[in-house]
Image (cartoon, rainbow, N blue to C red):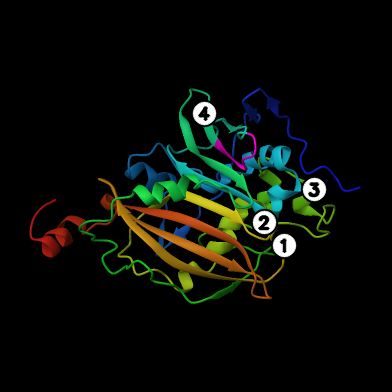
Amino acid sequence: MTANAFDTEIAESAEALIGPWRQPRQMLQAQTYDAHASIHDDATAQKLGFKGGTIEGPTHFSQFAPLGERLWGRAWFETGCLSAHYRSVCYEGEEVQAILSKPSPATRQCQIQMVKRDGTEVLRGTASVGEPYAATALEARLAELKPLADPVILRDLKVAQTSKRQTVRMAFDQIMGELYPFSLRQKLAVITESSPYYSSADNPWRKPIIPMEMLSVLFQYRSKDDPLPAKGPAVGLFADQEIRMVKGPLFVDEEYEVEREVVALSGSRRTESAWAKTRVFDKAGTLVATMLLNMATLKESYAPYEEEYRQLYGTGR
């Protein structure tokens, strides 16, 4: 007998599984990239019109894990997928709740959302296991995107550009670099949904597994060793993110190889977005997981934006 994955209290209605209210912790105050602070730093965030340092999006994925496991059991850890569009930022001290709508009979995909106490939607998307019959939330979103017009920050980036393969691993006490200045053990001390599966071998695979929210950290760990050619310094944030287990789970202190490919470029009034697909392989070369990430860079955070726009396109925007 292995331990139960979670002891999270889950409310159940005819239509949905609903997790408890939680207050996620913000662990990225000291994050730096391109030698400057990030959106998770209070002063930087406030300059850009936010109330303070924002909680990193994938932190919220942990609250869906007990719901996915309740619905699909072991398959959730092995072939589970969360596909989310981040709709509003969350600050430390705010309470949020995860809601998973039950799937229709004979389907393996359902709607998810996270809300604040006042009803503000933090994210919405889909959860699934295995190969779903329908497009995930982000696959559907990608199909509808308008291509990026008049790029400035991302003008040197091209769709289908790929990175070199990089070797990554995550040990319990390893600090995960400037992007993620904390260790797995530090995260597990404050994670919203703790599990013996994360900290011990008391699980079906007989070794500790990496929580889904920390897979984002693992996959991005060495991204700055082979960066995408974007102009900077500028401040970016995760706008959309999908993590899919293909042959999971992934294990603590095990070596993996990652490679990234730019699959789309899009934009909005305030942002230029690079959509990157990360593919993750075990040491036998088997694809074990993928991540689709929309890193949206705020135009106003790139100081020479207006001037370079005029130089490139001959007019103010």
Please, what is the three-letter code of the amino acid marked with disc 4? Lys
Alpha-carbon distance for marks 4 and 2? Answer: 26 Å
Provide residue 11's location: percent of width, then percent of height: 69, 25
Residue lying at the far right of the rendered structure: 1
Using the image, tell me which numbered label, if any, was put on residue 116: 4
Local packing at callout 1 (Cα closer than 10 Å; few below 14, some 14-19, many 20+) is some
Alpha-carbon distance for marks 1 and 4? Answer: 32 Å
Q: Provide the residue designation for mark 2.
A: 184
Please, what is the three-letter code of the amino acid marked with disc 3? Pro
Q: Earlier in the sequence, mark 1 or mark 4?
A: 4
At a point 27% along the width and 52% down the height, the residue shown is 299
Residue 189 in the magenta stretch? The answer is no
Using the image, tell me which numbered label, if any, was put on residue 196: 3
At a point 11% along the width and 59% down the height, the residue shown is 310
Residue range corresponding to the magenta coloring: 105-111
- Examine the rendered structure and indicate whether residue 12 appears above or below residue 46: above
Q: Earlier in the sequence, mark 2 or mark 3?
A: 2
